[in-house]
Amino acid sequence: MAQWILLIAVLLVLGHVPPGTCEFKRCWKGQGACRTYCTRQETFMHLCPDASLCCLADSKKPSPANKITEK
């Protein structure tokens, strides 16, 4: 009986552990990657949850908001 309680406790704990690949290694709506350094073809967007850099490929970089120019 004690083994069943231990098994259930372990399964409950494992159910609350986040996955190691998808959510903490991906960033910027799943299009970027968390890395220590960004390559030349990538742009730093923000910090990931593990304090690494969120690198986004230049081809996937969001366009800047249109600025209103005054004349």
Image (cartoon, grey):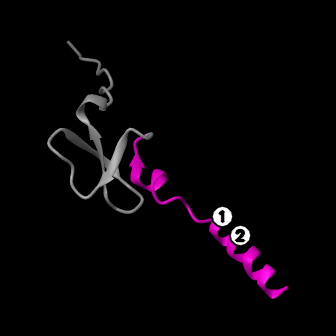
Vertical relation: 7 (above or below) 39: below
Q: Which residues are magenta?
A: 1-28
Residue 27 lies within the magenta run:
yes
Q: Quadrant of the N terminus?
A: bottom right
Determine if the magenta segment contains residue 3.
yes
Under circle 1, the secondary element is helix
Majority secondary structure of magenta residues: helix
Q: Nearer the viewer, residue 37 or 63?
A: 37
Quadrant of residue 8 in the image?
Answer: bottom right
Kind of residue at disc 1: Gly
Give the percent coordinates (x, y) of residue 5: 79, 81
Disc ID at residue 12: 2
Quarter of the rendering containing residue 12? bottom right
Q: Name the residue: 33% across, 30% down.
A: 62
Q: Secondary structure at mark 2?
A: helix
Could you classify mark 2 by the number of other residues whose Cα lies within 10 Å: few (under 14), some (14-19), or many (20 or more)?
few
- The relative height of residue 32 versus residue 47 in the rendered view (above or below) is above
Label 2 near label 1: C-beta < 8 Å? yes
Query: What residue is drawn where x is 30% and y is 26%?
Result: 63
